């Protein structure tokens, strides 16, 4: 028994442990690099989450390549398929990413965080199999894409969607054509398929989505709120940007 324990302190075994440890340290740092952007923007998943995901992915990948040292090198030769380990890592991280996606009405938040957590696991896998330069490059690209592409996307031509909820007085419910015309005059198009009408406390409530025909020229949400505040027959309203 004591002879078997000596294998764990041999030079080759300690060198393998040191190599795995350096991989884990690098994975932790790269994961924290990606997570800092999320933490800086006030997201729930931050540097700790990304660092742990990346480090765990590295640990589950790098140890497969050292099967000769398993159990102190005293076990029989084990034939391991690394692709199965990678498949398990990707599947497990998928469940973690699904937990940060939230849906509120027509708005969906957390998609970028979920995708970046999945990308952090891929960075860990690259580190685990020895593609250090590729892992570093991917970590930098993930950080840049989350921090810079949003600004670029905001400057490019595009359309924004708003979810509007209007509560009318009992006798002041408009016709859909009139509502669509008023929205168009402010630069928006009402999505007919999104219209939902309910009746609560003797008041009709209309919930629908509008799309800005030109994001730069359409009226801003605060301008729409000012118009609705003075609109005749509107008892209450809400305007929520649709995020996805």
Image (cartoon, rainbow, N blue to C red):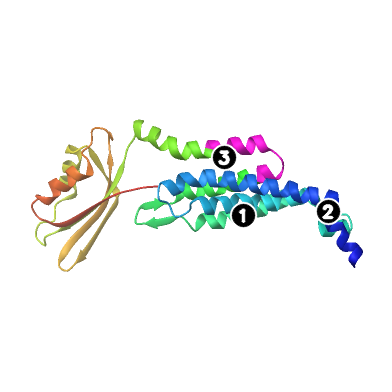
Q: Residues within 10 Å of mark 2 (few under 14, many from 20)?
A: many
Horizontal and vertical percent position of residue 163? 28, 50
**Foreground mark, 1 or 3?**
3
Q: Which residue corresponds to mark 3? A: 139
What residue sits 19% from the left and 49% below the top? 176
Horizontal and vertical percent position of residue 4? 89, 62
Q: What secondary structure is marked by label 1?
A: helix
- Marked residue nearer the N-terminal end (2 or 3): 2
Whether residue 79 appears in this view of the structure is: no
Residue in front for this viewpoint, 96 or 27? 27
Q: Is residue 159 magenta?
A: no
Residue in front for this viewpoint, 15 or 188? 15
Q: Which residue corresponds to mark 2? A: 69
Q: Quadrant of residue 156?
A: top left
What residue sits 44% from the left and 55% below the top? 44
What residue sits 66% from the left and 49% below the top? 24
Horizontal and vertical percent position of residue 53? 59, 52
Q: What secondary structure is marked by label 2?
A: helix
Q: Which residues are magenta?
A: 125-141
Q: Which residue corresponds to mark 1? A: 91
């Amino acid at each position: 028994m004591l002879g078997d324990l000596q294998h764990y302190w041999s030079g080759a075994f300690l060198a393998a442990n040191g190599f795995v440890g350096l991989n884990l340290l690098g994975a932790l740092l790269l994961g924290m690099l990606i997570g800092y952007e999320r933490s800086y923007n006030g997201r729930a998943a931050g540097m700790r989450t990304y660092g742990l995901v990346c480090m765990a992915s590295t640990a589950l990948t790098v140890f497969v390549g050292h099967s000769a040292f398993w159990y102190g090198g005293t076990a029989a030769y084990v034939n391991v398929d690394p692709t199965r380990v990678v498949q398990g890592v990707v599947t497990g991280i998928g469940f973690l990413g699904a937990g940060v996606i939230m849906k509120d009405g027509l708005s969906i938040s957390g998609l970028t965080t979920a995708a970046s957590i999945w990308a952090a696991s891929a960075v860990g896998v690259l580190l685990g199999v020895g593609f250090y330069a590729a892992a570093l490059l991917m970590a930098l690209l993930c950080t840049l894409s989350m921090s810079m592409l949003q600004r670029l996307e905001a400057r490019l031509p595009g359309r924004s969607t708003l979810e509007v909820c209007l509560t009318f007085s009992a006798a002041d419910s408009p016709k859909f054509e009139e509502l669509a015309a008023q929205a168009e005059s402010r630069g928006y198009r009402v999505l007919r398929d999104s219209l939902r009408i309910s009746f609560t406390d003797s008041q009709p409530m209309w919930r629908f989505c509008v799309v800005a025909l030109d994001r730069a020229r359409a009226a801003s949400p605060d301008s729409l709120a000012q118009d609705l505040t003075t609109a005749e027959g509107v008892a209450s309203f809400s305007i929520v940007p649709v995020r996805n």
